[in-house]
Image (tube, grey):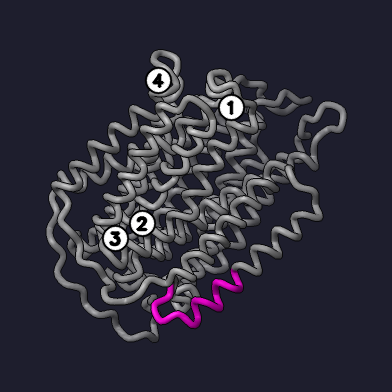
Amino acid sequence: MLVAPDSPAPVERPTPARIGRPAIGALGVLALALGTLQTVVDPARPLLERELGIDSAGAALVVSTLLVTGAIVAPIAGKLGDRYGGKRVLLVLMALVSAGGVLSSTAPNLPVLLAGQTLQGAMVGALPLSFILVRKNLPKGQTQVAVGVVSALFTAGGVVGTLASGPLAENLSWHWIFAAPTAVVVAATAALLRLMPNDVPSEQGTTIDWAGVALLSATLVALMLGLLLVTGNAVPPAAVGGIALLVAALAASWVAVERRAVSPMVDLRMLAAPAMWSASVLTVAVAAVSAMLQTFVPKLSAVSGDGYGLGLGTTDIGLLMMPASIAGVLAGSVGGLAVRRHGARSVVTFGTAATVVVLLGAAALHDTAWQLVVVRALAAFAGALATTALLASTATAVASKDTGIATSLLVVIRLIGAVAGGQVAGSILDAGSDPASGVPAEPAFVAGFLVAALVAGLSLLVVHHLKKEVQP
């Protein structure tokens, strides 16, 4: 469980095996390839619609399938990695992802492509498993830096996927947007099999809490599907309450089962500890704010209103957003180092406070392209810095046997926060749109920036619950 100020000192773990740069490099390449696979579909949606004869809803379902599967697999993978060893579970997971890549790249129709994406959704579980490996195999003081590097490379893969999708699909075929990254996944996995030492399982001789696994999976499926349905405005308002009640009932049942389990899926004492719940709240806030900006800035760049908006096309908007992607990758790279030197609390406080300042500035200054570029890049840097600090803090603040499950929960929570933030942003713009033209008025964008600043500002109230220094 979490190391709290009044808790007994954690049991010292054995001296980790020194792993060389080739092993870390293979882990980094794998993260890069997985990040690429996660984003290649978005730019290729119109092409997939034409080639497979599907509508926009079908193309959106491809992305949704990946998200829902990832939300289910991540905590299960993290827990199994804690129990049976991170390397062992990672290899199994990458076999599923590789099979999904082959299936997706050869899919003749939508159902087969969805089956492939279901398997590829397992990629989300790779992050917590990577954190298990770096914590168990790196010497003291280097885990935070490695967590930041792996996270940054996963983010960088997202940038690569967005940029490479079009050229691959147009110059070769849409099949290659899945085939090329999958080939890299296979190669990196083979390198990890040879270079990464086997990590000793943290838990042995205990039964698996299958009831807890099933109820947690059901809760996450209901929550993710509910958020996606609400985001797509596909359900009437009355149904939203029904979805909320279903999620609450499943969550309550899961908690009841976990309280009685001898070896629970998730130690509820860990979730209740200040360092964990505060990291969860902050992760939701950071992800929601990032998703809100991801909605506001492109929309403001595209509209051409009376005295506001830039009227840019899709290509120009992509170029305008590129500095933000680069800033996010850089922040992830230095975030772990910053945590090691200054502590997670200081890094998260700086990143969150800087986000508030940037958002207040955006509410006042958003008339030119350079202003939007600066706003999005600074916010992306600050948000990625805070996210990396939260992952690094959690990966090392919990007991070694809980590294996988704790970080996987943060990964899922970040996904949920992003979906919720996107929905809030869309609702703000819809409420402030002109009834005739459907174009959001300038006050709607100003209100959106201020609401995002308020969310970030309120999250500062829980920063002090983070541990000032992380436990190696």
Q: Which residue is mark 3?
A: 132
- Quadrant for the C terminus in the image: bottom left
Disc 2 from disc 1: Cα separation: 38 Å
The kind of secondary structure element at disc 3 is helix
The kind of secondary structure element at disc 4 is helix
Residue 305 image position (x, y, % from top left)? 76, 25
- Looking at the image, tell me whether mark 4 or mark 1 is earlier in sequence order: 4
Residue 314 image position (x, y, % from top left)? 58, 22
- Looking at the image, tell me whether mark 1 or mark 3 is earlier in sequence order: 3
Q: Are marks 4 and 1 in contact (CB under 8 Å)?
A: no
Residue 230 image position (x, y, % from top left)? 70, 48
- Which callout, 4 or 1, points to the residue nearer the camera? 4
Looking at the rendered structure, which numbered label has been put on residue 128? 2
Q: Horizontally, is 249 left or right of 307 in the view?
A: left
- Looking at the image, tell me whether mark 2 or mark 1 is earlier in sequence order: 2
Disc 4 from disc 1: Cα separation: 29 Å
- At label 1, the amino acid type is Ala
Q: Is residue 390 visible?
A: no
Q: Are marks 2 and 3 in contact (CB under 8 Å)?
A: yes
Disc 3 from disc 4: Cα separation: 34 Å
Q: Residue at x 31, y 61 (%)?
A: 81
Crowding at label 4, few (<14), some or many (≥20) Cα neighbours within 10 Å? many
